[in-house]
Image: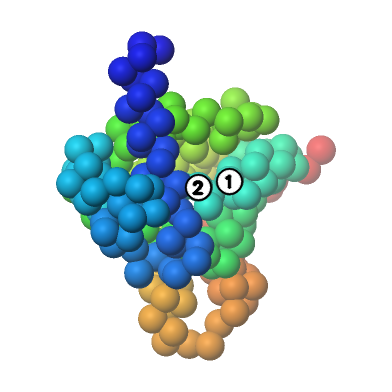
Amino acid sequence: MKRKEIQMNRMWKYFVDATAQIIEEEGLENVTIRKIADIAGYTASTVYNYFDELSHLIFFASMRFLNPYIKELSFYMTTGKNSVEKYLLSWECFCNHSFNNPHIYNAIFNADLGSKPEELLNNYFEAYQNDLTGVSDEVKPLIFEHNISKRSKAVLQKAVEEGYLDSDDSEEINNMTILIWRGMLTTVLNKRRDYNPEEAAAETMRYVRKITMNALKKPLELS
């Protein structure tokens, strides 16, 4: 890495870490460019030399809080005995973490970033390569895919190839699963119902399991 790239990477991390500090101490809704600049020890205009929008900084900083999910997802996937189980387990892990930190997951997976999210993800993992330590090869494609629909579709495609699901059914399962999760996340964020994180995850997974299992073409192989 060239000296200029090292300097840019260092500055980039200063601002991302400052944003993460504000999120942790004051909440995501209280993040401002001025606060980020003050903590990092630079001017607001300097921040904009490295980031186009505040939403990008919030996205990168929010990724710092995804480490527990990333690490646990690898374990969850190894316990699945077939592609359908792996699909359900991947969503169970995602629900458990997302409903415990709804603002963070909403910022990462639902917010309008005004740019190509995959490029932002690649930039993030270039700077924070240690976040991928110990992550299995099976999980890495999911981590590098920001689009939640494509993430789910990749796992479901294996279920189609193994004869558990029809292609059309897998598409419907994918769409319905995401709608269910987003609906519950909105409910939690807006406090429309008195769900705790565990209840929200359990209720979401109850529906996801139901629509998935009802679409099976053959019994699951459990051996």
Judge depth for marks 2 and 1 and give the one in front: 2
- Does residue 124 lie above or below 1 as drawn? below
Q: What number of labels is visible?
A: 2
In the picture, the quarter occupied by the N terminus is top left
Q: Residue under circle 1?
A: 67
Whole-percent x and y of residue 93? 62, 54
Please name the residue shown 81% across and 38% down the image. Answer: 223
Q: Amino acid at mark 2?
A: Arg
Q: Amino acid at mark 1?
A: Asn
Residue contact between numbered discs 2 and 1, judged by CB atoms under 8 Å: yes
Whole-percent x and y of residue 8? 32, 27
Q: Decide if residue 138 is in sight here.
A: no
Q: CA distance from mark 2 to mark 1?
A: 6 Å
Please tell me which residue lies in front, 61 or 36.
36
Q: Residue under circle 2?
A: 64
Q: Most extreme residue toward the front, as rendered?
A: 41
Please name the residue shown 59% across and 79% down the image. Answer: 196
Please name the residue shown 58% across and 46% down the image. Answer: 67
Secondary element under disc 2, as helix, strand or loop, is: helix
Q: Is residue 57 left or right of residue 207?
A: left
